[in-house]
Image: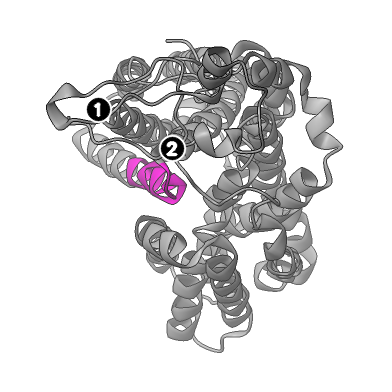
Amino acid sequence: MTASTRLSPADIKRWYRAVLGIFFASGLLISALLARLPDVAAGLHLSPGPMGALLLAMTIGSFAAVTASGSLVSKFGSRTCLVAGYVAACLGLIVVGVAVSFGLIPVAACGLVMQGAGTAVANVAANVQGVSAERALGRFVTPIMHGFFSIGTVLGAGIGALDTILGVPFMVHMMYFSAAIIAIVLFSLTRCHSENYGQDDTQALAQVGNYRVRDAWRDKRTVLIGLFVLGMALAEGSANDWVALALTRDYGTDAAVGSLGYTMFVVAMMIGRLSGTWFLNRHGRVKVLRVTCTCAVVGITVFIFAPSVPLGFVGLFIWGIGASLGFPTGMSAASDDPLKSAVRVSVVSTIGYGAFLGGPPLLGLLGEHLGIRYALLFVLIFVLISLALTRVLAPEMGQREHESTYTETIPQIFPSTGELPRITAHQSRQETGQPGTSGEKNTANYPLTRETE
């Protein structure tokens, strides 16, 4: 499909549902390995220290790839990068499975690098696809997409636990997870479309081609949105890595309570993402994010200074709700200008995933000296910065937060409803011989006509 082809509402809905499938597959990809890390340690005969060093291979692969992901998506397109990213990540999972079965630590490290790099590229490309589908749909839906990622992680963790109980071999586990993920992604991509959808004007497409990643890095609003996302990604990533350990070490609980605390945070994130779209569509992103960022500040503060475990759990829940909408809504804000959406989203994704991947290990170094709870003060500072930056997520002058984008290259005729064909500004100039006027922008952005699914 070309950028000039007009999609029906049914096609756009199928595109949106396909993107949900891609985000769900991303959740499965993450949990496929994390749910069975004890099997990796046992199979390779590694104690916690060397095991942590091995897992750095995945972080290194992710961090190296995420810095190049924006350029890759800009050059090859999000769909190509999704295929390449998921294939590389799933091959990495299979390599890890083989390495654990035969006790090959260097091979396992190579597999983890592949998995981390592939996941990073796929995640950036998925966000570019997601905001493109959201823009075509005409309402906020990226939080739901990230909610499906959370659903994938929860389901994958549950299957991993069941496989452990049933004694399913680790290599078999990795192979069937990889096959399922690739199948979901390939099927979903058959219903996805170009991130340049809606741009049928030759001059507009030329502008897309001339706008590069380096230009986005020089754009003040894009960088500020990236800094906003950085704080919220750090709030999410630090909780994923350190909440359970903070509960066991700093609060003095057992491992079961630590796992329960992590579960509460993930559930709060999922609730926030699945329900937050209603508030975003009703009140707009700036007002909603001021509330959620404030919740994140309150939740982290309570968790740091709570004198008891129950109060700490309250803080965790508020923290999860507060952090839930920051990353996906930042992606939406970066996509406000459809001509520059793909490049800007890739840059903001790079900043966000860089914080998500690199922040928690640095937090661990602080935790060695301050304790994990007090090290979270570092995260709190960045969340406060994100709160101060919520204003930059307002639409740029002349743009609205969301309106559906459609191409008008071919007039649509609906005899059964008596609707007249719509004429584009370009066609009007050809037929009347009149030069373009300031009214052309409105002419080319009529709302959807009624179509049946």
Q: Nearer the viewer, residue 57 or 401?
A: 401
Query: Looking at this view, is 167 or 371 the one in front?
Result: 371
**Local secondary structure at mark 1:** loop
Q: How many marks?
A: 2
Residue 271 location, quadrant: bottom left
User: Where does residue 246 sit, x and y in percent of width and height?
Assistant: 57, 67
Q: Write down the residue under mark 1.
A: 168
Distance in Å between CA atoms under marks 1 and 2: 56 Å
Question: Which of the 4 image quarters holds residue 351?
Answer: top right
Q: Magenta residues, as a range?
A: 138-153
**Residue 149 on the magenta segment:** yes
Q: Which residue ends up furthest to the right in the rendered image?
A: 218
Please tell me whether residue 243 is drawn above or below residue 34 in the rendered image. Answer: below
**Label 1 neighbour load within 10 Å: few <14, some 14-19, many 20+:** few
Q: Is residue 132 left or right of residue 277?
A: right
Tell me where residue 117 appears, x and y as whole percent.
62, 23
Q: Circle 2 is placed at which residue position?
A: 446
Q: Where residue 73 sits in the image (x, y, percent)? A: 63, 20
Q: Quadrant of the N terminus?
A: top left
Q: Amino acid at mark 1?
A: Val
* Colouring used for the render: one colour
Asked if residue 234 lies in the magenta stretch, the reply is: no
Evaluate whether residue 253 shows in this view: no
Q: Residue 336, can we see it?
A: yes
